[in-house]
Image (spheres, rainbow, N blue to C red):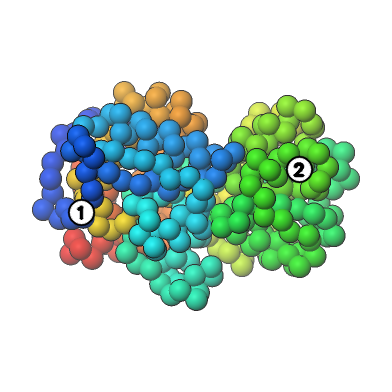
C-alpha cells in the first residue's frame, strides 16, 4: 500500500457498500430516490471545471444511489467559502486553503475557524507555475516588476498561490495584478494585453490553447527564491513540470507544488463517501477515470500530506481506507468516530 502514498492509483476489489453505524447526514433525493450532492469545482477554462464535471457525471452513472452535480466557478478559495455557507457538499481544495479555512487564518482570519468539513482523499500534486511569451524579454521573477500579470480568477486558490509567491519574493506590490478568468487571461496574454499569467495545474488547458498560436516559456524560481517561498509557506514544496507537458518544456522545470484534496461536509452520509471512493478506485474504472483528466490517476489516500494539515478524514473515508489496508493515525480519525 505504500505506492498509494506516492499518488499512484492502485487496483482495488469492488466492495459491497453497506450502511455504517456512524453514517449521518440528510441529503435530498431526486425523483428516482438517488441522493443529491453538489460538487464544487472550478471556473470554465480551468482543469477543475473539467475534472469535477467529469468525475461527478461518472460517479453518478456508476451508482444507483448517487446523483452528483458539478457546481462550477468556485476554485479553491471560492469552494471553501461556499462550503462555509452550506452551498456545496463536496469540493476540491488546495492544501493551504483548506488549512486556512480549518484554522481561521490567512484568507479566513476575519471569519474564524471552520471545522465542519472532512477530507476524503488526495487528488493530485498541483504544480503552480507562471507563463510568459517566449519573446517577452521576461526571464526571471524580478523582471515582473512593473508588468501586468494575471494572478487567476478572483476567489480562486490559484490567485492566492500567485499572491503568496510574489509576497514571499517582495514583488506583490510591484506588479500590476489582474484577476481574469483562465480563458480571458490566456487570450489577453496571446494578444499582448498581459505580460504573464499564473496557473495552477500542469498541463493547464488554457496554456495548451496559447501554444497553438504562440511560443511560450515557463518562468521558474531559483534556489534562493524557492527558499523564501517555502520558508513563508511550509505547505508548499518544490515540484517539477515534466518534459512534454507543454511543447516549450523539454526538461524538468522546477515550480511551486502542493497537494490537492477532495473534501466533504462532515454530515455527508458515510456510506455515500464510501461508495464514491469504491467507484473512483475500482480497478476496472481506472481507464475511464484517466479519460476524464490525466491528473485523476494520481488520486491517493493523502495521508502523508494530511500529517501537516491535521485535518481529519471523513468517516466514510476512514472506513474505506482501513478496509483497503491503510492504517489511519488517531489524529486523523474524526471526533464523531471516537
Q: In the picture provided, is 248 more to the left or to the right than 28?
A: right
Identify the image quadrant of residue 188: top right
Q: Residue at x 35, y 31 (%)?
A: 58
In percent of the image, x 76 and y 68: which residue is there? Answer: 173
Q: Which residue is mark 1?
A: 26
Q: Nearer the viewer, residue 283 or 117?
A: 117
**Near-viewer residue (10 or 260):** 260
Quadrant of the image containing the N terminus = top left
Query: Which numbered marker is on residue 188?
Result: 2
> Which percent across, then down, holds residue 242?
63, 35
Res 271 → quadrant:
top left
Which quadrant is the C terminus positioned in?
A: bottom left
Residue 85 x/y as whole percent? 39, 63
Circle 1: element type = loop
- In the image, farthest residue toward the front: 31
Indicate the position of residue 245 as horizontal and vertical percent values: 64, 32
Determine if residue 3 is in view: no
Q: Is residue 155 left or right of residue 326?
A: right
Query: Which mark identifies residue 183?
Result: none
- How far is disc 2 from disc 1 in space, using C-alphas? 45 Å
The residue lying at 34 percent from left, 52 percent from top is 89
Q: Quadrant of residue 187?
A: top right
Amino acid at each position: 500500500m505504500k505506492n498509494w502514498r506516492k499518488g499512484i492509483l492502485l487496483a482495488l476489489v469492488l466492495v459491497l457498500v453497506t450502511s455504517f453505524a456512524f453514517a449521518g447526514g440528510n441529503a435530498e433525493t431526486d425523483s428516482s430516490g438517488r441522493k443529491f450532492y453538489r460538487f464544487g469545482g472550478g471556473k470554465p477554462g480551468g482543469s477543475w471545471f473539467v475534472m469535477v464535471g467529469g468525475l461527478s457525471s461518472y460517479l453518478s452513472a456508476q451508482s444507483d444511489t448517487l446523483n452528483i452535480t458539478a457546481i462550477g466557478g468556485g476554485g479553491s478559495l471560492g469552494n471553501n467559502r461556499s462550503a462555509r455557507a452550506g452551498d456545496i457538499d463536496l469540493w476540491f481544495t488546495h492544501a493551504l486553503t483548506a488549512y486556512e479555512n480549518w484554522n481561521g487564518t490567512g484568507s479566513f482570519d476575519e471569519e474564524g475557524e471552520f471545522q465542519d468539513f472532512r477530507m476524503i482523499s488526495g487528488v493530485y500534486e498541483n504544480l503552480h507555475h507562471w507563463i510568459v511569451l517566449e519573446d517577452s524579454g521576461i526571464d526571471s521573477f524580478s523582471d515582473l516588476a512593473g508588468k501586468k500579470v494575471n494572478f487567476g480568477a478572483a476567489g480562486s486558490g490559484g490567485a492566492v498561490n500567485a499572491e503568496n509567491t510574489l509576497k514571499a519574493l517582495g514583488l506583490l506590490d510591484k506588479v500590476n495584478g489582474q484577476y481574469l478568468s483562465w480563458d480571458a487571461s490566456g487570450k489577453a496574454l496571446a494578444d499582448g494585453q498581459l505580460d504573464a499569467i499564473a496557473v495552477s495545474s500542469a498541463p493547464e488547458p488554457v496554456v495548451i490553447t496559447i501554444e497553438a498560436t504562440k511560443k511560450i516559456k515557463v518562468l521558474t524560481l531559483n534556489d534562493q527564491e524557492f527558499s523564501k517561498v517555502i520558508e513563508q509557506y511550509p505547505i508548499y514544496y518544490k515540484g517539477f513540470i515534466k518534459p512534454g507537458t507543454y511543447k516549450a518544456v523539454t526538461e524538468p522545470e522546477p515550480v511551486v507544488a502542493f497537494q490537492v484534496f477532495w473534501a466533504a461536509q462532515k454530515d455527508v452520509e458515510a456510506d455515500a463517501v464510501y461508495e464514491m471512493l469504491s467507484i473512483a478506485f475500482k480497478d476496472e474504472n481506472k481507464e475511464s477515470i484517466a479519460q476524464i483528466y490525466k491528473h485523476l490517476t494520481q488520486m491517493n489516500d493523502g495521508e502523508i500530506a494530511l500529517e501537516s494539515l491535521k485535518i481529519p478524514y471523513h468517516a466514510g473515508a476512514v472506513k474505506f481506507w482501513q478496509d483497503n489496508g491503510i492504517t489511519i493515525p488517531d489524529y486523523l480519525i474524526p471526533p464523531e468516530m471516537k
